Amino acid sequence: MLPSWLAQNPRVRPGLKFGRAQQFVINPNGIAELCDMLKDCPKHAPTPLLALPALAERLGVGEIRVKDESQRFGFGAFKALGGVLAVYNALSSAVGNAYHIGTNFADVMNGLHGEVTAPFVFSTASSGNHGRAVAAGAKLFGNRCVIFLPKFTSAEKEAAIGARGAEVVRVDGDYDAAVAECKRVSRENGWEIISDTSWEGYDKAPRIVMRGYCVLAHEAIAQQGRQAPTHVFVQAGVGGLAAAVIGYLWAMLPTRPTFVVVEPESADCWFQSNLAGKPMPASGNADTVMGGLACREISPITWDVIGQRADWFMTIEEDQVMPARRLLAHPLDGDPAIASGPSGCAGLAGLTRVCTDRATFEVLKLDAKSRVLLINSEGNLGETPV
């Protein structure tokens, strides 16, 4: 019998193909070219894929590799990929509509078509990292930016957003309240919303954001080489990162890994959606230290990827976060140290929970030959774990 914190996806079946519905959400074509374009962006470089052999031995698996997004752009989180690309896409599309010409990253960054791009004001709701990413993109291209933050967002993340030139609006409520306020104010002012979650009639920007996230999955495949992962533990908030990682690997790898989606117990919207077979709200109030995952509702557009192809859904408890951060920050002998935030280490917290429950370990078909891929989705923006 499965524990209450783990559930299998009944919709997954052998030979399930990556089809048109999935490609609408995550289009794997052209990601290599996107990586080439990003070379024009200051500070851009592929993030490392780090091996943790000592930890793998302790947990009883063959290999653990961590895609360390704490080093992305010098920004500290994977979100930079989506925010910067989505801002560029909005501006380059405007240039194309105005002049019926193509443009490139460097031209827009250098203000070549400023008469078209300068009036844009970008906005989004965020618990922190996505807001920083949109702010960074707006600053890179010289545009005004307004970020709506829920009440729980840390002072450190607010300061990091402000440091990138954005205006911050605090909302007396949770993430969903911040989304609602962002939509209202942006409509009144004609601002361009760059959201990482979708809603009825709004899905283009979230799809562009997720296309940016595919860059890290593309890099991971190249860095892993011929030994592709057998298991992927990926954390989920509204689902953007999980959809990009699952969708891209599903489309590109000849043998599909086992995908495990990890969420906070109080923000288990994906866990509940899997049980119901359709998008459902979380069972809790999303009050979690894992701010980047503190979401009560999924992004509906991601259902056709995560809801159809994630093999397992699981939750983790709050007291499992700090031990996972310490494992990364103070590793076992010979393993590299990794700076991780509470959301960044969630995949490892999930793996550790599974590996310390023998029956669950066997149900997920983990063994001494398993190759596990984790995503350290954010670095340490607050206190260092001790």
Image: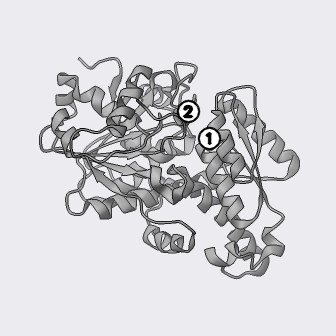
Q: Quadrant of residue 114?
A: bottom right
Residue at left offset 84%, top offset 74%:
115
The kind of secondary structure element at disc 2 is helix
Q: Give the position of the C terminus as an image quadrant.
A: top left
Q: Give the position of the N terminus as an image quadrant.
A: top left
Compared with residue 114, is residue 261 higher up or lower down, i.e. above or below? above
For marks 2 and 1, give the CA distance.
8 Å
Q: Is residue 382 left or right of residue 163?
A: left
Asked whether 180 or 45 is in front, the reply is 45
Residue at left offset 45%, top offset 58%:
214
Q: Is residue 54 left or right of residue 190?
A: left
Mark seen at residue 128: 1
Question: Amino acid type of disc 1?
Answer: Gly
Q: Quadrant of residue 235?
A: top left
Q: Earlier in the sequence, mark 2 or mark 1?
A: 1
Q: Quadrant of residue 339?
A: top left
Mark seen at residue 187: none
Compared with residue 109, is residue 298 higher up or lower down, i.e. above or below? above
Residue at left offset 38%, top offset 24%:
320
Residue occupied by mark 2: 291
- Alpha-carbon neighbours of circle 1 within 10 Å: few (<14), some, or many (≥20)? many
Q: Position of residue 36 (x, y in %)?
A: 48, 74
> Do residues under tags 2 and 1 come within 8 Å of each other at their CB atoms?
yes
